[in-house]
Amino acid sequence: MRTPRHNPGTAGGFGLIEVLVAVLILAIGLLGLASLQTNGMRFNHTSYLRTQATVLAYDIVDAMRANRGAAGKSETALGGAYLTNYTDGPPTGSSIAEADLRNWKTLLTTLLPTGRGQVIQNGRLFTVNVEWTERGGAPTVFSLVTSL
């Protein structure tokens, strides 16, 4: 009794198509993983910048609390030693408040892309705004409202 033999000429190219389909599926999967990695890195960088802005806002508030004498002692309105606008450059004086603001403004420009900050006062409340711009986007602002 003869066993049937497989004729190699009848099934030619079938294995090659399977390999090409498998390579195509693998390529699409790898592109998806690369996209996930890129988005993860972008979101991680955004989170890093927000964390830096938060730390910098709390940093100037802590400096203001440590130097409350320069901020004033009145219950209704505190002094203006730490008040600054976005457009103000770092102060050049030698007081503690001016040194604190100078260091803060320098850290803002160093740690955040186009970073800048302001401290404004409304009665006993102080608002610290930290602004920065991420790649090609609109400016992002972190605001902290506190009383001393």
Image: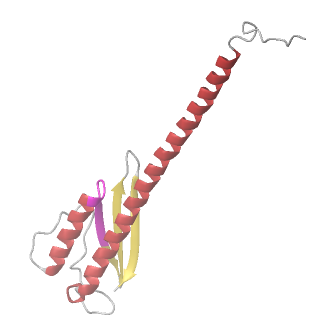
| Rendered location of residue 43, percent (x, y) | 46, 53
Q: Relative to 56, is 132 above or below?
A: above
Quadrant of the drawing holding the N terminus = top right
Farthest right residue in view: 1
Displayed quadrant of residue 118: bottom left
Residue that appears at 23% across and 69% down: 104
Q: Is residue 9 left or right of residue 25?
A: right
Q: Is residue 49 left or right of residue 13?
A: left
Residue that appears at 24% across and 70% down: 84
| Rendered location of residue 28, percent (x, y) | 58, 33
Nearest the viewer among 108 and 92 is 108
Looking at the picture, the colour scheme in use is secondary structure
Nearest the viewer among 146 and 35 is 35
The question of residue 122 being in magenta is answered with no
Magenta span = 111-119
| Rendered location of residue 64, percent (x, y) | 26, 81
Quadrant of the drawing holding the C terminus = bottom left
| Rendered location of residue 27, percent (x, y) | 56, 31
Q: Is residue 50 left or right of residue 79?
A: right
Q: Relative to 112, is 19 above or below?
A: above
Residue that appears at 15% across and 80% down: 96
Displayed quadrant of residue 66: bottom left
Nearest the viewer among 25 and 124 is 25
Residue that appears at 21% across and 89% down: 69
Farthest front residue in view: 1
